Each structure stands twice: as structure tokens, then as C-alpha cells.
Amino acid sequence: MNVAGSASYVNASPVPVGQCPSIMLKPDRMSDTMQQPRIQYVQIAYTTFGQGPPLVFAANAWGEINLFLGPENRATVDTLANGGYQVILYDGRGQGSSDRNIADMSQAARLADLEAVVDRLALERFALMALVHGCTTAITYAATHPERVSHLILWSPYTSGAAYYSGTPVLRAIKALSGMLVDNWEFFTLTMANWLLRFQDAERAKRMARVFRNGTDPQDYVTLIEALEETDVTTLLPQVEAPTLVIRDTFSVFTMPEFTRAVAAGIPGAHVVTIDNMPDLPGAALTFLRGDEPAALSSTRPEPSAFRTVLFTDLVGHTEMMTRLGDDKGRDVLREHERITREVLAANGGTEVKTMGDGFMASFGSVTKAVECAVALQRAFAEHTDIADESLHVRVGLNAGEPIEEDGPDGRKDLFGATVILASRIAAKAAGGEILVANAVRELCAGKGFLFSDRGEFTAKGFDEPVRVYDVKWRDDHD
């Protein structure tokens, strides 16, 4: 075990040759040919504390060793280590004691840093914890290495860096200041520390700013933020199999409840807990890791709302279309898709819950209205395709139950829980132009004149029991 305060090093090679931008081809000065690819290794610093099952912290933005060995956060590490866990911290590339002046801060590179550390320590299975920016790395690793992650703990997570940095006035202001931070690094770090502390403790802000400045260099920070803005792990959430705890706090200006709710809703079976101060963090983590079910966890789970039918749509071939048409023309097609969807929802009593860019989530108080809306949607898109230059093929999935309801950031109600997740899984099983519904929807529509075709059972990810789905025939000739 490494002694407290010292660091060991591991070389991180991001990914195999030909798949990573950090693998460079160097021109041959004597000819026009290229030499063989040369792998650029990055030294990653790591250290461990305590004995017991391993608990790895995915690197955030300032270096985990640097961050957690300071007076502000050292108690977190000590509590976790004294609680029977081997705490493993590492400084990501460009941070702390790891190599600085790094050009490649991509998600693939950050993931490789985590992989290098756990492989060096020969950790076959471990708990994984992350805060804020480290959460995208942790989610990616948990989704792609389910056999190695025993538990996943995410504090103030987000899935889309672009959405995160446009999410609040504070973050937009930090982004606006990033253009001048290279020449005003001390001012930038001091301003950010004061923002974190809500301008209530100037002396503490000075100490925190020094930790930030020691944690990374200004250019490395800019490169990292640019890479984070390109990161989006939304589609990986359903693939996470490890028991997951999502922690949201009431004291940080960087915590956005809508993002923590979205992460918790997207990961099957995720728990949510709210903490009111930093000292509560390790206690919540230990409680979860030990498998306890305290009132603090159970009380934060919202109660189910009234019975709803949840409808998901998804535009087939969206990415290919955007690539083929380009951003401007592709966005025009998406606007037409959005217009048709919203008009049909309004005409059939549907409530738009949210849009995901190439799809919608909507809810209905009546299961019959929901199926009627699904049929109307497919007919509207078919009519559009008959006359438009660019066709719109949409898949639709429905499920009925009692979803969890919470207030969304825009004042609208947002829905979460197993009912919603299963509706999304069913939509993903449909082909373009199809409507697939859960058996519960079919049974509740008995005698309403709909024609259903049995499509058999499938086991949805995150659900133990297989689900039987039915295709709703919507064409007039029922072909």
C-alpha cells in the first residue's frame, strides 16, 4: 500500500493503435513515407489509503489526490478508509502529479487513465465513485465493464457536457471567463472558489483557489473543458448494471437537480439521496456500499404519481440524416418532425414531458387516447413522407403504470421510474413506422377497436421478467 501523501505512477496508453488521437504518426524527414505509429504514454499518478474492498475515485477536473488531500476534503477519504475500504485516488492527465501539458483530454483518453490504474492494481472487481466531471468517465466504465464494477456512486452527475455548461448562469459565466483565464489564472480560480462558496467566506475561497491552481495549469484546464463539452453518455445510462447511488446536494452551485434526476431515471434501479453538507457525503456512500436501507435513502424516493400511459417516439436514422444533409438542412427536417409531433399530441390530449432532439416523451391520462395518438402520429408521418423530399420514419413505444413524478427545471412535470424506462425499452424494439405496446396497454384497450399483433417476449435490460409486446396495426388496410 502506498503511504499517505505519496504517489505511484502508471503509464496510460489510451486505446489500441489507430483508434486514438494521442497515437501520433511522425513524418520521416528523409522521405515522403510515414514511420510506424508511435504510442504516446502519459504518466498517471495514483495513491491508496486504508485496507479492505477497493473504492476507486474517477478523476474530476482538479486531480483527486490534490483535491482530497487538502484540508477541505481530507475527512472524506479518512472516513471511507476507516469505514473498511481501500480508497484509491488518481490524478487524471494534466492534473495534480500526473503529466501536464496534454493535448488529448478526450473521453476515450480519460477512460484509459482509469483503466490503467485499476489494471496496474489488478483490481478484478471494485466500487467506483465520482463527482461532477468524473461521473461521465465512471458511467462509461460501468456501462462497458459491468463485470468489474460492484457499486457505482455518482455525486452531482451530468451526462451531456454541452448541456451542463449552458445549464445555469454560474456555469455560463465560467464558460465566458474561460477565454481570458490563461492570462488571468489567479483571478479565475479565485472567482470560481468564491462562486462555490456563494461569496460567503473570502479566506476559505483563497485557500480553495490555491488548491485549484495547484491542481492543474490553465491551458490543461481549457483543453479539458473543451473535451468535456463534447462528452455525452446519455445512451450509456441504460447499460449500467451495477447498483447505483446518485447523490445530489443542496449546497453546491454546480449541482443541477434536473441532471441528477435524469441520471437516476436513466440507470435501472438507481437510488437517490440528498445531502446538506460535505461531511454527509462519506456516510451516504458507506451506507450504500454496505447494502443498508436507511431512512435517508428511502425517504428521498418520490412516491408514484397517478396512473399514466407513457409514450416514447424516436426518429429512425437521425444521425445518418444529419451527416448526409448537413446541420442546417438536417435541422429543418427535425423542426418538421417536432411540429408534426406537437400538433398530434395536442390534438389527442397528450402532454409533452420532454424532447430528446430526435424523439419525444409524452404522457396521457387515458390509455385509449395514448394509442389513438400513436396511430395518428404514424399516419401523419406517412402522409408527410408521401409528399416530402425527406422521409420521416418514427418508432413508437407505449407502457402504462404509475410513474414517479417530479417538477422539472422548466416548471413542467417530469416522469421517472420503471414505467418510463420500460416504455423507452419497448420503443427501442420497434422498427420505423411501428407502434409497440406493453401487454398492459393492450389489455386496457380491449374492446376499443384496435388491432394488435403478438410480437412475442423480450427481456428488457434492467428487468428480471420478460415483457410481452404487441404491434398496433394502424394502416387502414391493416397490412
Image (tube, rainbow, N blue to C red):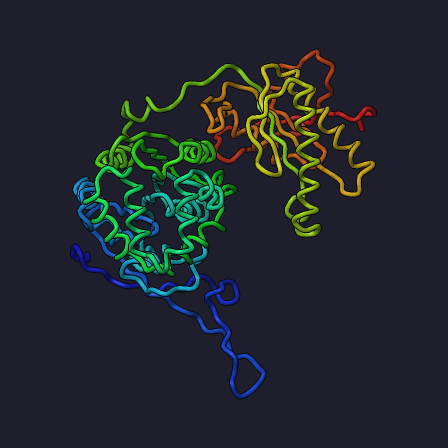
Whole-percent x, y for residue 465 in the image: 51, 28
**Residue placed most toward the observer, 461 or 81:** 81
Quadrant position of the N terminus in the picture: bottom left
On screen, residue 17 above or below 147: below
- Going by the image, does 220 lie left or right of 311? left
Extreme residue in the bottom direction: 30
Task: Decide if residue 286 is in sight here.
Answer: no
Left or right of residue 81: residue 382: right
| Residue closest to the eye, 73 or 378 | 73
Instruction: Using the image, determine if residue 45 lies above or below residue 30.
Output: above
Quadrant in the picture for the C terminus: top right
As drawn, which residue projects farthest toward the top? 447
Based on the displayed image, in which of its 4 quarters is residue 279 positioned?
A: top left
Which residue is at 34% across, 49% downward?
60
Left-right relation of 85 to 111: left
The percent coordinates of residue 391 (x first, y second) are: 76, 40
> Residue at 65% of width from left, 49% of height from top?
327
Q: Quadrant of residue 353?
A: top right
In front: 66, or 77?
66
Inspect this view and state whether residue 243 appears: yes
Q: Count all numbered tags in the image, as a single digit.
A: 0
Residue 393 image offset from top left, x and y in percent:
72, 37
Tell me: 100 left or right of 106.
left
Q: Position of residue 429 (x, y in %)?
A: 62, 35
Q: Residue at x 36, y 35 (%)?
A: 246
